[in-house]
Image (cartoon, grey):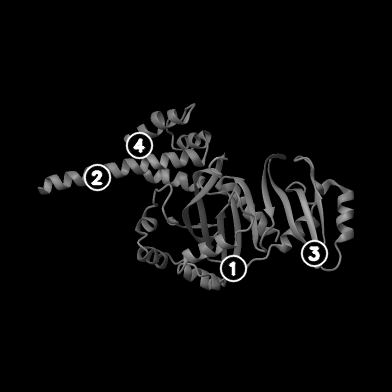
Amino acid sequence: MTETAAEGMGVLSSMVEGAQKLSILLELIERATSIAVVRDFLKSRELSHSAGSWEELRTKRILPAIDEGQLTLADLHALLRRTEGFGRQHIFLFWCAADRAAAMIAEERVRNLLLERDAVEAADDPLVIDLPAEPTFVDVRFDKMGGVKFMALKEIEKRTYRKLTSEVTDDKAMTFTKVYKVEHQRAINFARLWDNGLLEIRIASRDNATRYRDDLAHFFNRLKPIIVRNEFAEVSLMQLKKNLWAKRDELQHLVKFSTYTLQDDEGMSLRANAVLSADDLAGSERVAQSLAAFNAGAVQCSNSNIYFKIVEKGETVKEIHVLLNGEDNEFAVTAAVTEEEYEYVLHQVLKHN
Protein backbone atom coordinates (compact mmCIF):
# COMPACT_ATOMS: atom_id res chain seq x y z
CA MET A 1 0.00 0.00 0.00
CA THR A 2 1.38 3.39 -0.99
CA GLU A 3 1.91 6.13 1.60
CA THR A 4 -0.91 8.16 0.04
CA ALA A 5 -3.28 5.19 0.16
CA ALA A 6 -2.34 4.53 3.80
CA GLU A 7 -3.06 8.15 4.68
CA GLY A 8 -6.41 7.90 2.93
CA MET A 9 -7.30 4.76 4.88
CA GLY A 10 -6.31 6.52 8.08
CA VAL A 11 -8.58 9.45 7.31
CA LEU A 12 -11.45 7.14 6.41
CA SER A 13 -10.97 5.12 9.61
CA SER A 14 -10.98 8.32 11.67
CA MET A 15 -14.19 9.46 9.96
CA VAL A 16 -15.90 6.13 10.67
CA GLU A 17 -14.78 6.21 14.31
CA GLY A 18 -16.04 9.79 14.64
CA ALA A 19 -19.42 8.86 13.15
CA GLN A 20 -19.74 5.92 15.54
CA LYS A 21 -18.90 8.12 18.53
CA LEU A 22 -21.43 10.70 17.41
CA SER A 23 -24.15 8.10 16.99
CA ILE A 24 -23.60 6.64 20.48
CA LEU A 25 -23.32 10.10 22.03
CA LEU A 26 -26.66 11.18 20.60
CA GLU A 27 -28.30 7.95 21.77
CA LEU A 28 -26.93 8.39 25.30
CA ILE A 29 -28.01 12.04 25.45
CA GLU A 30 -31.51 11.07 24.34
CA ARG A 31 -31.69 8.49 27.13
CA ALA A 32 -30.22 10.81 29.73
CA THR A 33 -32.26 13.97 29.30
CA SER A 34 -35.23 15.67 27.67
CA ILE A 35 -35.79 17.44 24.37
CA ALA A 36 -36.29 20.69 26.28
CA VAL A 37 -32.82 20.46 27.86
CA VAL A 38 -31.15 19.85 24.48
CA ARG A 39 -33.14 22.70 22.90
CA ASP A 40 -31.91 25.02 25.67
CA PHE A 41 -28.38 23.78 25.08
CA LEU A 42 -28.58 24.67 21.38
CA LYS A 43 -30.26 27.98 22.14
CA SER A 44 -27.45 28.94 24.54
CA ARG A 45 -25.08 28.61 21.58
CA GLU A 46 -27.37 30.73 19.38
CA LEU A 47 -28.12 27.75 17.13
CA SER A 48 -31.43 26.71 15.57
CA HIS A 49 -33.20 24.74 18.26
CA SER A 50 -36.91 24.31 17.49
CA ALA A 51 -37.92 20.64 17.25
CA GLY A 52 -40.95 18.56 18.14
CA SER A 53 -39.24 15.17 18.33
CA TRP A 54 -35.85 13.61 18.96
CA GLU A 55 -35.60 12.63 15.29
CA GLU A 56 -36.14 16.23 14.19
CA LEU A 57 -33.74 17.53 16.82
CA ARG A 58 -31.07 15.11 15.68
CA THR A 59 -31.42 15.34 11.90
CA LYS A 60 -32.42 18.98 11.46
CA ARG A 61 -30.56 20.69 14.31
CA ILE A 62 -27.64 18.77 15.76
CA LEU A 63 -26.18 17.00 12.72
CA PRO A 64 -26.25 20.11 10.47
CA ALA A 65 -24.57 22.10 13.26
CA ILE A 66 -21.88 19.39 13.48
CA ASP A 67 -21.36 19.44 9.70
CA GLU A 68 -21.04 23.22 9.68
CA GLY A 69 -18.54 23.23 12.56
CA GLN A 70 -20.92 25.02 14.93
CA LEU A 71 -20.95 22.05 17.31
CA THR A 72 -18.20 19.58 18.16
CA LEU A 73 -18.05 16.18 19.81
CA ALA A 74 -16.51 17.94 22.81
CA ASP A 75 -19.66 20.08 23.10
CA LEU A 76 -21.84 16.97 23.13
CA HIS A 77 -19.51 15.33 25.66
CA ALA A 78 -20.01 18.36 27.90
CA LEU A 79 -23.79 18.09 27.53
CA LEU A 80 -23.75 14.38 28.40
CA ARG A 81 -21.48 15.09 31.37
CA ARG A 82 -24.03 17.57 32.73
CA THR A 83 -27.10 15.41 32.18
CA GLU A 84 -26.11 11.77 32.73
CA GLY A 85 -25.59 10.09 36.06
CA PHE A 86 -27.29 12.44 38.51
CA GLY A 87 -29.86 10.84 40.76
CA ARG A 88 -31.10 7.25 40.91
CA GLN A 89 -28.01 6.68 43.06
CA HIS A 90 -26.96 5.76 46.57
CA ILE A 91 -24.37 8.22 47.83
CA PHE A 92 -21.78 7.33 50.46
CA LEU A 93 -19.74 10.07 52.15
CA PHE A 94 -16.18 9.72 53.46
CA TRP A 95 -13.41 12.06 54.51
CA CYS A 96 -9.64 12.17 54.92
CA ALA A 97 -7.05 14.80 55.80
CA ALA A 98 -7.09 17.71 53.35
CA ASP A 99 -3.38 17.40 52.54
CA ARG A 100 -3.81 13.73 51.59
CA ALA A 101 -6.84 14.54 49.44
CA ALA A 102 -4.96 17.31 47.64
CA ALA A 103 -2.10 14.91 46.92
CA MET A 104 -4.46 12.19 45.64
CA ILE A 105 -6.24 14.47 43.16
CA ALA A 106 -3.05 15.95 41.70
CA GLU A 107 -3.85 15.96 38.00
CA GLU A 108 -0.53 14.59 36.78
CA ARG A 109 -0.72 11.71 39.29
CA VAL A 110 -4.25 10.72 38.29
CA ARG A 111 -3.55 10.92 34.57
CA ASN A 112 -0.41 8.80 34.90
CA LEU A 113 -2.30 6.15 36.88
CA LEU A 114 -5.03 6.10 34.22
CA LEU A 115 -2.41 5.72 31.51
CA GLU A 116 -0.88 2.77 33.38
CA ARG A 117 -4.30 1.12 33.32
CA ASP A 118 -4.58 1.65 29.54
CA ALA A 119 -7.34 4.21 30.16
CA VAL A 120 -5.78 6.72 27.79
CA GLU A 121 -9.09 7.97 26.48
CA ALA A 122 -10.45 8.43 29.98
CA ALA A 123 -7.52 10.68 30.77
CA ASP A 124 -7.55 12.79 27.62
CA ASP A 125 -10.93 12.42 25.94
CA PRO A 126 -14.01 10.73 27.44
CA LEU A 127 -14.70 7.25 26.16
CA VAL A 128 -18.03 6.85 24.37
CA ILE A 129 -19.33 3.39 25.18
CA ASP A 130 -22.75 2.08 26.05
CA LEU A 131 -22.48 -1.36 27.66
CA PRO A 132 -18.85 -2.34 28.29
CA ALA A 133 -18.00 -6.00 28.97
CA GLU A 134 -16.27 -4.94 32.20
CA PRO A 135 -16.79 -1.85 34.41
CA THR A 136 -14.84 0.91 32.67
CA PHE A 137 -13.73 4.41 33.66
CA VAL A 138 -14.80 6.65 30.81
CA ASP A 139 -14.21 10.17 32.05
CA VAL A 140 -12.07 12.07 34.53
CA ARG A 141 -12.83 15.66 35.39
CA PHE A 142 -10.75 18.22 37.29
CA ASP A 143 -12.66 21.31 38.31
CA LYS A 144 -13.46 23.72 41.11
CA MET A 145 -16.68 24.66 42.89
CA GLY A 146 -17.03 27.32 45.58
CA GLY A 147 -13.27 27.74 45.57
CA VAL A 148 -12.69 24.02 46.34
CA LYS A 149 -10.95 21.81 43.78
CA PHE A 150 -12.16 18.32 42.98
CA MET A 151 -11.45 15.29 40.82
CA ALA A 152 -14.38 13.22 39.53
CA LEU A 153 -14.14 9.76 37.98
CA LYS A 154 -17.05 8.35 36.03
CA GLU A 155 -17.48 4.62 35.52
CA ILE A 156 -19.88 2.73 33.26
CA GLU A 157 -20.97 -0.71 34.37
CA LYS A 158 -23.12 -3.22 32.50
CA ARG A 159 -25.62 -4.90 34.78
CA THR A 160 -27.53 -7.96 33.62
CA TYR A 161 -30.96 -8.91 34.92
CA ARG A 162 -33.28 -11.81 34.22
CA LYS A 163 -36.99 -11.12 33.87
CA LEU A 164 -39.40 -14.06 34.06
CA THR A 165 -41.57 -14.13 30.93
CA SER A 166 -43.34 -17.51 31.09
CA GLU A 167 -43.68 -20.81 32.89
CA VAL A 168 -44.44 -24.09 31.12
CA THR A 169 -45.52 -27.35 32.74
CA ASP A 170 -45.20 -30.58 30.73
CA ASP A 171 -47.07 -33.26 32.66
CA LYS A 172 -46.10 -35.99 30.23
CA ALA A 173 -42.40 -35.26 30.49
CA MET A 174 -42.82 -34.32 34.15
CA THR A 175 -40.95 -31.04 33.65
CA PHE A 176 -41.50 -27.47 34.70
CA THR A 177 -39.74 -24.82 32.63
CA LYS A 178 -39.26 -21.14 33.37
CA VAL A 179 -38.31 -18.77 30.54
CA TYR A 180 -36.43 -15.58 31.33
CA LYS A 181 -35.64 -12.57 29.21
CA VAL A 182 -32.12 -11.25 29.71
CA GLU A 183 -31.94 -7.46 30.05
CA HIS A 184 -28.88 -5.25 30.23
CA GLN A 185 -28.74 -1.95 32.10
CA ARG A 186 -26.22 0.87 31.80
CA ALA A 187 -25.20 1.78 35.35
CA ILE A 188 -23.21 4.91 36.15
CA ASN A 189 -20.99 5.12 39.21
CA PHE A 190 -19.00 8.15 40.35
CA ALA A 191 -16.18 8.95 42.72
CA ARG A 192 -15.60 12.62 43.48
CA LEU A 193 -12.78 13.65 45.80
CA TRP A 194 -12.45 17.26 46.97
CA ASP A 195 -9.20 18.79 48.12
CA ASN A 196 -10.80 19.61 51.48
CA GLY A 197 -10.97 15.84 52.17
CA LEU A 198 -14.59 15.05 51.26
CA LEU A 199 -15.15 11.95 49.14
CA GLU A 200 -18.47 11.09 47.47
CA ILE A 201 -19.01 7.58 46.16
CA ARG A 202 -22.18 7.36 44.06
CA ILE A 203 -23.44 3.88 43.18
CA ALA A 204 -26.21 3.51 40.60
CA SER A 205 -29.40 2.21 42.20
CA ARG A 206 -30.45 -1.38 41.62
CA ASP A 207 -34.05 -2.46 41.02
CA ASN A 208 -33.76 -5.42 43.37
CA ALA A 209 -31.45 -4.30 46.18
CA THR A 210 -31.61 -2.26 49.37
CA ARG A 211 -28.04 -2.78 50.56
CA TYR A 212 -25.00 -1.70 48.58
CA ARG A 213 -22.05 -2.93 50.67
CA ASP A 214 -20.82 -5.30 47.97
CA ASP A 215 -21.21 -2.71 45.19
CA LEU A 216 -19.31 -0.20 47.32
CA ALA A 217 -16.49 -2.64 48.09
CA HIS A 218 -16.14 -3.67 44.43
CA PHE A 219 -16.09 -0.04 43.28
CA PHE A 220 -13.40 0.89 45.82
CA ASN A 221 -11.37 -2.07 44.57
CA ARG A 222 -11.58 -0.74 41.01
CA LEU A 223 -10.59 2.74 42.17
CA LYS A 224 -7.24 1.56 43.51
CA PRO A 225 -4.61 3.01 43.52
CA ILE A 226 -6.16 6.35 42.56
CA ILE A 227 -8.38 6.34 45.67
CA VAL A 228 -7.61 3.87 48.47
CA ARG A 229 -10.39 2.93 50.90
CA ASN A 230 -8.26 2.66 54.05
CA GLU A 231 -7.28 6.32 53.79
CA PHE A 232 -10.87 7.39 54.51
CA ALA A 233 -13.29 7.44 57.44
CA GLU A 234 -17.06 7.43 57.07
CA VAL A 235 -19.05 10.66 57.45
CA SER A 236 -21.97 9.77 59.75
CA LEU A 237 -25.31 11.30 58.79
CA MET A 238 -26.97 10.61 62.15
CA GLN A 239 -26.78 14.28 63.08
CA LEU A 240 -28.44 15.23 59.79
CA LYS A 241 -31.46 13.02 60.53
CA LYS A 242 -31.70 14.47 64.03
CA ASN A 243 -31.25 18.09 62.96
CA LEU A 244 -33.80 18.06 60.16
CA TRP A 245 -36.54 16.84 62.49
CA ALA A 246 -35.49 19.01 65.43
CA LYS A 247 -35.57 22.11 63.20
CA ARG A 248 -38.64 21.04 61.21
CA ASP A 249 -40.60 24.20 62.00
CA GLU A 250 -37.94 26.58 60.71
CA LEU A 251 -37.15 24.29 57.78
CA GLN A 252 -40.71 23.78 56.52
CA HIS A 253 -39.86 25.89 53.46
CA LEU A 254 -37.01 23.47 52.73
CA VAL A 255 -37.94 19.95 53.88
CA LYS A 256 -41.06 17.78 53.78
CA PHE A 257 -41.21 14.54 55.81
CA SER A 258 -42.92 11.45 54.41
CA THR A 259 -41.72 8.93 57.02
CA TYR A 260 -39.65 9.16 60.17
CA THR A 261 -38.55 6.15 62.24
CA LEU A 262 -36.98 6.11 65.71
CA GLN A 263 -35.26 3.03 67.10
CA ASP A 264 -33.87 2.31 70.55
CA ASP A 265 -30.86 0.20 71.52
CA GLU A 266 -33.10 -2.84 72.10
CA GLY A 267 -34.36 -2.78 68.53
CA MET A 268 -37.81 -1.38 69.35
CA SER A 269 -38.97 1.20 66.84
CA LEU A 270 -41.67 3.81 66.31
CA ARG A 271 -42.52 4.83 62.75
CA ALA A 272 -44.58 7.78 61.59
CA ASN A 273 -45.87 7.67 58.04
CA ALA A 274 -47.75 10.17 55.85
CA VAL A 275 -50.51 8.49 53.84
CA LEU A 276 -50.75 11.02 51.01
CA SER A 277 -47.73 12.24 49.06
CA ALA A 278 -48.79 15.84 49.63
CA ASP A 279 -48.86 15.42 53.42
CA ASP A 280 -46.03 16.52 55.69
CA LEU A 281 -45.41 14.78 59.02
CA ALA A 282 -43.86 17.98 60.34
CA GLY A 283 -47.29 19.59 60.31
CA SER A 284 -48.84 17.07 62.72
CA GLU A 285 -48.63 17.93 66.42
CA ARG A 286 -49.86 14.46 67.42
CA VAL A 287 -47.05 12.81 65.44
CA ALA A 288 -44.53 15.15 67.03
CA GLN A 289 -45.80 14.35 70.54
CA SER A 290 -45.72 10.59 69.93
CA LEU A 291 -42.16 10.70 68.62
CA ALA A 292 -41.09 12.98 71.48
CA ALA A 293 -42.51 10.53 74.03
CA PHE A 294 -40.50 7.67 72.51
CA ASN A 295 -37.36 9.74 71.94
CA ALA A 296 -35.58 9.26 75.25
CA GLY A 297 -32.33 7.59 76.28
CA ALA A 298 -30.52 5.58 73.60
CA VAL A 299 -32.90 6.37 70.76
CA GLN A 300 -31.92 7.53 67.30
CA CYS A 301 -33.47 8.02 63.88
CA SER A 302 -32.93 4.81 61.93
CA ASN A 303 -34.35 6.16 58.68
CA SER A 304 -36.17 9.13 57.26
CA ASN A 305 -38.01 9.63 53.99
CA ILE A 306 -37.86 13.29 53.01
CA TYR A 307 -38.19 15.74 50.15
CA PHE A 308 -35.89 18.72 49.69
CA LYS A 309 -37.86 21.60 48.21
CA ILE A 310 -36.61 23.93 45.51
CA VAL A 311 -38.29 27.29 45.99
CA GLU A 312 -38.40 30.14 43.48
CA LYS A 313 -40.12 33.45 44.21
CA GLY A 314 -41.77 31.97 47.28
CA GLU A 315 -43.24 29.00 45.38
CA THR A 316 -42.12 25.36 45.56
CA VAL A 317 -41.21 24.42 41.99
CA LYS A 318 -39.83 20.95 42.68
CA GLU A 319 -39.46 18.41 45.46
CA ILE A 320 -36.48 16.03 45.35
CA HIS A 321 -37.03 12.69 47.07
CA VAL A 322 -34.16 11.66 49.37
CA LEU A 323 -33.89 8.50 51.46
CA LEU A 324 -31.89 8.67 54.67
CA ASN A 325 -31.44 5.00 55.49
CA GLY A 326 -29.07 2.13 54.85
CA GLU A 327 -25.50 2.67 56.03
CA ASP A 328 -24.57 5.35 58.55
CA ASN A 329 -22.93 7.47 55.83
CA GLU A 330 -25.49 6.83 53.08
CA PHE A 331 -28.30 8.75 51.45
CA ALA A 332 -30.13 8.11 48.19
CA VAL A 333 -31.60 10.36 45.52
CA THR A 334 -34.35 8.18 44.11
CA ALA A 335 -35.14 9.87 40.78
CA ALA A 336 -33.06 11.32 37.97
CA VAL A 337 -32.17 14.96 38.60
CA THR A 338 -30.07 17.62 36.94
CA GLU A 339 -26.50 18.34 37.95
CA GLU A 340 -27.62 21.55 39.63
CA GLU A 341 -30.34 19.73 41.59
CA TYR A 342 -27.90 17.09 42.78
CA GLU A 343 -25.45 19.75 43.96
CA TYR A 344 -28.33 21.45 45.80
CA VAL A 345 -29.20 18.23 47.66
CA LEU A 346 -25.57 17.54 48.54
CA HIS A 347 -25.20 21.09 49.86
CA GLN A 348 -28.26 20.67 52.10
CA VAL A 349 -27.03 17.31 53.41
CA LEU A 350 -23.65 18.73 54.35
CA LYS A 351 -25.02 22.00 55.70
CA HIS A 352 -27.46 20.38 58.13
CA ASN A 353 -25.29 17.47 59.23
Depth order, front residue of 248/121: 121
Judging from the image, what secondary structure is the residue with disc 2 in? Answer: helix
Is residue 218 in sight in this rendering?
yes
Instruction: Residue at 81% x, 47% y: name it.
Output: 281
Tell me the SS state at disc 3.
loop
- Name the mark on residue 66: 4
**Mark 1 or mark 3: whose residue is earlier in sequence:** 1
* Residue 135, picture quadrant: bottom left
In the image, what residue type sits under mark 2?
Ser
* Mark 4 vs 1, N-terminal side: 4
Residue under label 2: 13
Which of label 2 and label 4 is nearer to you?
A: 2
> Is 266 or 191 nearer to us in this picture?
266
On residue 95, the disc is 1
Q: Nearer the viewer, mark 1 or mark 2?
A: 2
Q: Residue furthest front?
A: 172
Label 2 and label 3: CA atoms lie apart by: 64 Å
- Measure the alpha-carbon separation of dots 1 and 2: 46 Å
Q: Position of residue 257 (x, y in %)?
A: 76, 49
Residue 271 at what x, y percent from top left?
81, 54
CA–CA distance in space, label 4 to label 1: 43 Å
Report the disc number at residue 267.
3
Q: Residues within 10 Å of mark 2 (few under 14, many from 20)?
A: few
Tell me the kind of residue under disc 3: Gly
